[in-house]
Image (tube, grey):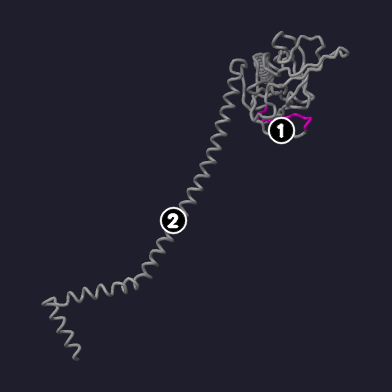
């Protein structure tokens, strides 16, 4: 009871006179380390939790940035491929703009894996106007010709196939001959020129237009080597194809003016025959 009365008296005295301020300040300084020690576990726990959240946020942000960077790199690869494809297509169109009357870009679907059968499958067929024997070009020269057509696709033979031959002429002097495939996409041969033929290394061979398959004037090959044996009737001549036979993804179907005129005449004849049949069939008995 005495302590209660004493406490009340001290509180009243301090309230009126503020005699205990100095003692309170001393005690406040004295207990500050205790207060800090008591609060430390809670403060440390809060700091660790906040640091953990920041670390997780940084890790998440880092993963998102890494994923975004990977996606952007993939997109850049696609853009580079599209840019290269556009360049190839522009080159194809520019190479024939002043020569062929009509061209159509076709994509190579597959390549025959037989080393002696240089055949390719194309994504254009009869519905697109393709026909057997039609010439194929790329941006640099003659690729081959169509051998078989279907409604929506076709098969073609390359000039490097051993079973294929192209009528050509030497661009320098007009000397005509035939080049045949060797089974090697990097070399074709000229087996029918005599040893005294006027032909030199570096001569450009172009299509002669003979036979009506290949329009005249397209690059076919450049003479690589000539071997003349006086004891043999023909020279051994090799040439490098102008076209990139083993690198193309797209090639051109070509219609010459003569072929277009022939197709137009055939269509007109078929239409006239159909009209005549309809007229005769509808006549009264």
Residue 191 picture location, percent across and down: 81, 17
Residue at mark 2 to residue at mark 1: CA–CA distance: 52 Å
* Residue extent of the magenta highlight: 115-125
Q: Earlier in the sequence, mark 2 or mark 1?
A: 2
Secondary element type, mark 1: strand
Please tell me which residue is depicted at 29% across the width and 72% down the height of the picture: 32
Quarter residue 224 falls in: top right
Quarter of the figure that contains the C terminus: top right
Q: Nearer the viewer, residue 21 or 233?
A: 21
Furthest-bottom residue in view? 1
Label 2 Cα crowd, 10 Å radius (few <14 / some 14-19 / many 20+): few
Residue indicated by mark 1: 111
What SS does tag 2 mark?
helix
Callout 2 touching callout 1 (CB < 8 Å): no
Residue 163 visible somewhere in the drawing:
yes
Q: Residues within 10 Å of mark 1 (few under 14, many from 20)?
A: some
Figure quadrant of residue 141? top right
Residue 57, disc: 2
Q: Which residue shows up at 66% across the image and 29% down it?
A: 248
* Residue 117: percent from left, percent from top: 77, 30
Indicate left or right for 226 with 65 as reference.
right
Locate residue 268: give its quadrant. Answer: top right
Q: How many marks?
A: 2
In the depicted structure, whether residue 11 falls above or below residue 187: below
Image side of residue 130 versus residue 33, left or right:
right
* 244 vs 99: above or below: below
């Amino acid at each position: 009871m005495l302590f209660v009365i004493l406490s009340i008296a001290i509180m009243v005295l301090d309230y009126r006179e503020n005699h205990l301020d100095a003692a309170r300040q001393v005690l406040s300084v004295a207990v500050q380390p205790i207060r800090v020690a008591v609060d430390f576990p809670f403060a440390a726990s809060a700091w660790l939790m906040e640091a953990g959240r920041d670390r997780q946020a940084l890790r998440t942000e880092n993963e998102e940035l890494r994923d975004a960077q990977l996606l952007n790199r993939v997109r850049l690869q696609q853009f580079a491929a599209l840019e290269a494809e556009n360049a190839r297509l522009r080159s194809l169109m520019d190479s024939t703009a002043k020569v062929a009357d009509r061209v159509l870009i076709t994509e190579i679907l597959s390549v025959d894996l037989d080393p002696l059968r240089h055949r390719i499958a194309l994504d254009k067929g009869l519905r697109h106007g393709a026909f057997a024997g039609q010439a194929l070009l790329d941006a640099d020269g003659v690729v081959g010709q169509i051998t078989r057509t279907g409604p929506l696709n076709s098969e073609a033979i390359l000039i490097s196939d051993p079973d294929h031959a192209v009528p050509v002429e030497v661009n320098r002097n007009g000397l005509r001959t035939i080049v045949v495939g060797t089974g090697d996409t990097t070399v074709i041969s000229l087996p029918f020129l005599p040893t005294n033929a006027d032909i030199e290394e570096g001569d450009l061979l172009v299509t002669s237009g003979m036979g009506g398959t290949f329009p005249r004037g397209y690059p076919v090959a450049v003479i690589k080597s000539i071997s003349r044996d006086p004891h043999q009737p023909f020279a051994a001549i090799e040439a490098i194809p102008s076209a990139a036979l083993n690198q193309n993804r797209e090639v051109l179907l070509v219609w010459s003016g003569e072929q277009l005129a022939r197709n137009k005449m055939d269509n007109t004849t078929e239409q006239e025959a159909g009209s005549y049949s309809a007229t005769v069939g509808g006549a009264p008995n």
